[in-house]
Amino acid sequence: MVASAPAKINWTLDLLERRSDGYHELETVASSLDWGDELTFAPQPDSADVTITCNDTSVPTDERNLVHKAAMRLARRAGVREGAAITLNKRIPAGAGLGGGSSDAAATLRGLNVIWGLHWPTPQLLPLAATVGSDVPLLLVGGTAIARGRGEFVEPIPFAWAGWVTLAMPNIHVATPTVYAHVRPDDLRPSADGSRAFADRQATARWTALELLEHCRNGLEAPAFRGFGALADLHAELQRRFGRPWRLCGSGSTFFTAWDSAEEAAECVKEVRAVPGIRAEATRLETNCVEDSNYP
Ligand code: C5P
């Protein structure tokens, strides 16, 4: 069985409050993309081991990998005695803010749910997903959604913009806790009222890429720029060179911008790839995400 593990971008990300457990209460609008990792799953009926093979030798394949964590937790919670052999084909860089590890974990929950014959509906998988990481529930649901709390309360929305996105992925590994450690009180907002605009199917279907970008913001940009000066420099350079807004994906290090046509997005990719140390991709949003009639 093969499952895709799409990258995600955050159109908005508002930090609302620092909680006593150290996490931040937030509201984010995010979309899964038509680009990402791929996993294959094979049952191992004669062994309780979960083995991971990965094309990228820098990725740990032991319990440090969120795929392993997700698999072990699902096996324990569901009382599964058989194992699984998981092959992970990575494209999404780590420490890039694209939700790569979280999406791999979400795909693992979906894949093992099938090959272990569990038939758990998505709402049953969601609380387990949240224990693996704050972005895992969002990526389990897929498509475009608003996430609240520390990220675990996910509401799918009928966002209908159908343009193109360019990702600029610098060779900078950003650890999410480092960025959150740089959050100051003036990075917090009293409310996240801009998110609802993304839930209007008719309005978002008509948005141009520039109108979409005007609605985008990310409260983690200022803390990320304080922690990683090279990101602030790259951001200024991208905005100057392309004359349009670029936003940080999650806690970084990837930036994205939006385009109305495939041609413009491809031209931008070509230009970004000319800069040493930066990968670039053009992609649309994921269209055939998991539709689960059991999801409320
Ligand atoms: O939940 P996850 O392991 O993905 O979070 C990684 C780190 O990001 C947390 O340890 C915390 O420092 C920070 N975080 C946060 N508030 C959130 C999500 C993550 O402070 N809503």
Image: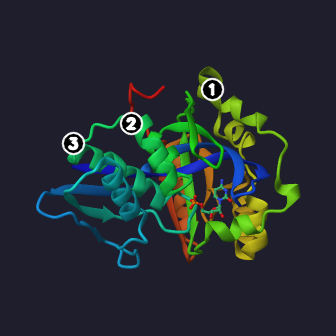
Q: Which residue is mark 1?
A: 206
- Horizontally, residue 10 falls left or right of residue 191, namely left
Residue furthest to the left in view is: 46
- Which residue is depicted at the point 53% across and 34% down? 162
Three-letter code for the amino acid on which mark 1 is drawn: Arg
- Which quadrant would residue 291 be assigned to in this image? top left
Residue furthest to the top in view is: 202
Residue 158: give x, y in percent of width and height.
55, 27
Three-letter code for the amino acid on which mark 3 is drawn: Gly
Q: Residues within 10 Å of mark 2 (few under 14, many from 20)?
A: some
Q: Is residue 250 visible?
A: yes
Instruction: Report helix, strand or loop for mark 2.
Output: loop
Instruction: Report helix, strand or loop for mark 3.
Output: loop
Q: Which residue is mark 2?
A: 290
Q: CA distance from mark 2 to mark 1?
A: 25 Å
Q: Which residue is mark 3?
A: 117
Residue 109: give x, y in percent of width and height.
36, 49
Establish whether ligand 1 lies closer than 8 Å to the Cβ of label 3. no
Q: CA distance from mark 3 to mark 2?
A: 17 Å
User: In this view of the protein, which residue sits in the foreground, 255 or 228?
Assistant: 228
Instruction: Report helix, strand or loop for mark 1.
Output: helix
Foreground tag (2 vs 1): 2
Q: Is residue 32 visible?
A: no
Sequence-first tag of 2 and 1: 1
Q: Give residue 163's mark.
A: none
Determine contact: label 3, label 1, CB under 8 Å. no
Q: Residues within 10 Å of mark 1 (few under 14, many from 20)?
A: few
Asked if 197 appears above or below 46 in the picture, the reply is above
Q: Quadrant of ligand 1?
A: bottom right
